[in-house]
Amino acid sequence: MKKRTITALIIVLIFAPLLIFEQMIIPFEVGVGLLAVLAAFELISMFEREHKFDWFLKVAIIIFTIGFYVIIGNVWHSSSGQNLNELKTDVTLILTAALLVIFMLSIFLKNFDANTLGIALLIISYLGLGFGSLVILRLLGSRYIIYVLMVTVLTDTFAFLFGVKYGKHKMAPVISPKKSWEGAIAGTVIATVVASMFALFYGMIFPNGSFFNANGKQTILHGITSLGTGADKAPILWQQALIIIPLTLTLSIFGQLGDLFASKLKRTYDIKDFGEIFPGHGGVLDRFDSTIFAALFLVFVFRILGEVWPV
């Protein structure tokens, strides 16, 4: 536990400045990109427990994972506060290139079968989309990353605490035997209450013009969609609460699904952790599995809201 706590503090000390300061957005993009590459190596290493990959395929997976990350994350932007409609998520070109190269490799590489093809596409899309979504949220504003982290960390923490003390009904006994329905419900409820308050009263917590709210955003949806706003485009709190509370609850659930998805991969390949880069926590995916899943879901919802009810 001591090692885990120290590692968590180091992670916070490293990433907090990358989130808070506008000038650190490029280091943030580079850092998250590095995490995506490390995660790709972790998954390749896991899958190679059953089937060795040719080095040509490994190189292709890493290159296209980076490509997906760069395009989804719009990493050519060097400042936050971007409008959602300014950020492109069309992966047609990189997907087409990835498919052409991987299909070609499947012809010429001896050990490349249909299962390997699926694995390669899983790594590229899972990590490129997931980590790229984190950068999209950072480009929209640090508050969105903080919101996602608040939801996933609170869910995970209180699910563990309540699960240890009150957990009796196993949620996924084969995939993750320690998780209970009691813990999951408690974590979801607490995360929903706390993070919804942050999302709904952001403008009151950080007044217009303050360091954390230079653009005068009033809620987490302000500037994302016109849904729940008045004729003057100012958010109507009770209407936005009807959106934000269910959104936060669903975000908590998706964070847990991301954790379970990663756990299923580990169970399938009989490993305890994806890696050892974070002492006490495991690998990159052990630490960020729920976060990238939740971030991907939030970007997806924002895209729908922005298209159907544009600002």
Image (cartoon, helix red, strand yellow):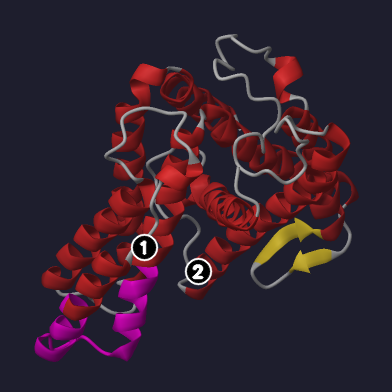
Crowdedness of circle 2 by 10 Å Cα count: few (<14), some, many (20+)?
A: some
Q: Do tag 1 and tag 2 residues touch (Cβ < 8 Å)?
A: yes
Residue under the point 42% across and 49% down: 131
Label 2: element kind:
helix
Residue under the point 36% across and 57% down: 128
Residue under the point 59% across and 59% down: 258
Locate residue 7, reporting x and y percent: 49, 29
User: Is 26 rendered above or below residue 161?
Assistant: above
Rendered-image quadrant of the C terminus: top right
Q: Which residue is mark 1?
A: 43
What is the residue that sits farthest to the front in this orientation? 231
Q: CA distance from mark 1 to mark 2?
A: 9 Å
Q: Which residue is mark 2?
A: 265
Closer to the camera, 297 or 112?
297
Asked if the stretch drawn in magenta spans residue 116, the answer is yes
Does residue 262 appear anywhere in the picture? Answer: yes
Instruction: Tell me the quarter of the picture where residue 149 sits.
Output: top right
Locate residue 141, reporting x and y percent: 51, 30
Query: The disc labelled 1 sits on which kind of residue?
Result: Leu
Q: Which residues are magenta?
A: 101-123
Query: The disc labelled 2 sits on which kind of residue?
Result: Leu
